[in-house]
Image (cartoon, grey):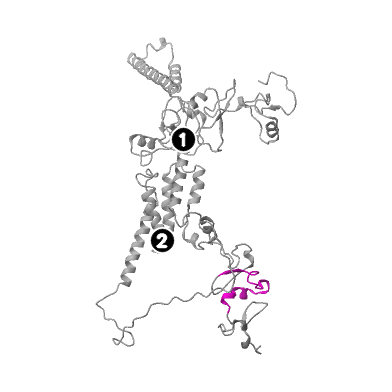
Amino acid sequence: SSCSQPLVGSLTELTCSRCSHTFHSACCDPPLSLKAVENILNMEEPWICSKCTPCAGCNDFDIVFGTKRYPAPPTLFTKDGGSSIQLCSRCIPLYESDQYCPNCCHCWDDFKYQKVQRVLRWQRKLKEDANEENTKNQAKKRKRGGEEGEDDPMGDDEEDAHLDDVAAVCHVDNEETVAYGMVADPSWYHPDSSVWGFNEGSMLICDSCNLWVHAGCAGLTKEEYEKTNRGEHPIYSKEFLCRKCCVVRCQSLIAALNKEDQLGLFAVPVTEQMAPTYHDVIKNPIDLQTMLQRANKGEYHNYAWIRELFELMVTNALVFNRPNSAFWKEAKRYHEACMSKVFSEIGMGKAAPAGKHADALREAFEKAKRWREAEKERVQKDDTAEKKDLVAGAEVAAVKLGPLVTPEDVPSCVPFVNVRLKAVDAFFSSWMDCCFCCGSSGASDTMLFCVDCGEAYHSFCANAPIYSMSASAAASWRCPNCKVCEITGDVPEDETMLLFCEMCDRACTLTELDPPL
């Protein structure tokens, strides 16, 4: 009902959109300030009082006291990530004694469940006795030829109807299962529910937080549940986790995988700038950043998915890169390090079996092994064969070469800046084009790339007339360090003899012009 005290003022009144009762802001639980009332009145969503708000623990309404705001336990998995839930006065003690499913927030009461089950067993026994008595009566009627049928106080039709009613009350078929991902109906959690997996009769304990979880809320079928109890399930028999503990474990596993990635090869998604043909070869890309985003949303219901995606990630690297290349060797080292530290028998991922990509990963290693053997046979030297030159024949003299000389690195004639970056910033900037002079990656539309050394320059840093240059002139542009005479292709001893065109920035020697200057 509405508040018993007279309502005074307009901003301190709230009307429930369901029961149409009006309440003082101070009479709400918890009491609301004037600012909170103004925000509620300005919201597009209708306001609902505590008596019309269903309890998160039993999905029922507390029409006497209303539901109370209760701080959400840290082990509770909520999709909206709220810090509190609404509970009725009956469910609050159950939450305080940890009698709730961390996956669905629903409370469980084993004492109530056993009591209801005793009533159902009694009703089932009543049904069996009634069926047995009916069978005996039918046998007597057939034996006497139906002569005493008129003295039966209950006719056949009425008696059959009575037995059907008893059978309807005693229906306790627990073979009905629910498809995974379907929204659970509140009636499924009742102790006498015929839907399997959502009451106290089919629960598993989380090995991390020690809370009981409905098998249906965890996505287990009845066959998987029975295998888990017998110790035959490949994952849950080793370690079973609720949704919240699974999210925390997946985050820890991904952090451990990220720690072993020394080159950042699997840190972020591969873009076209990193590898232009990557998505033409790899049809199912995956990386650690994408895995972490999915884990934060709770999309992984057990951490065996982390190992499966880890194997897919390594397989993609082995398939795309040439065997025995630098990236291929790093992917192999990364796989061996993670298998020995993360997914070992004593690691965090001990219960994660090999996924569906394990065969493809094994095949990639075998293919690389066959390639190395074939390459070794191709370059293998035959010591018994006579070495002959195709022209001179056997008259070939051995020549001993001296040590190789490292060419001098000519200093740059263009001033440049040394930019010091953190490891993370350096990783991302390595995929961007930066100006050789100023080190900035901005103003990319004004950048020119040297056709010889490949360095990038801002047109205003290199003093190049980019807006008057044709497409062919911009494609064949040379930076000041690589400038040559476009007529002879050489650099004169006196570089001051080079003359630069003000339209295309090409250089020509003064003496090679016609007429010479």
Q: Identify the residue shown where x is 68% and y is 36%.
A: 44
Can residue 91 be seen at all in this image of the molecule? no
Residue lying furthest bottom? 515
Q: Earlier in the sequence, mark 1 or mark 2?
A: 1
Residue 243 position within the rendered picture, expressed as x and y whole percent measured from the top left = 47, 38
Q: Are marks 1 and 2 in contact (CB under 8 Å)?
A: no
Q: Quadrant of residue 54?
A: top right
Q: Quadrant of residue 29?
A: top right
Q: Identify the residue shown where x is 52% and y is 22%.
A: 90
Residue lying furthest right? 9
Residue 450 position within the rendered picture, expressed as x and y whole percent measured from the top left = 57, 72
Magenta part of the protein: which range? Answer: 455-483
What residue does disc 2 label?
328
Task: Please say if 16 is above or below 264.
Answer: above
Residue 297 position within the rendered picture, expressed as x and y whole percent measured from the top left = 52, 43
Report how far apart the C-alphas of labels 1 and 2 lie in the structure.
41 Å
Amino acid found under the numbered disc labelled 2: Trp
Q: Which mark is residue 252?
A: none
State left or right for residue 445 relative to residue 152: right
Q: Quadrant of residue 224?
A: top left
- Is residue 480 shown in magenta? yes
Task: Please say if 280 is above or below 240.
Answer: below
Q: Residues within 10 Å of mark 1 (few under 14, many from 20)?
A: many
- Is residue 200 shown in magenta? no
What residue does disc 1 label?
217
Q: Secondary structure at mark 1?
A: loop
Q: Nearer the viewer, mark 1 or mark 2?
A: 2
Residue lying furthest top? 151
Q: Secondary structure at mark 2?
A: helix
Residue 416 position within the rendered picture, expressed as x and y whole percent measured from the top left = 58, 68
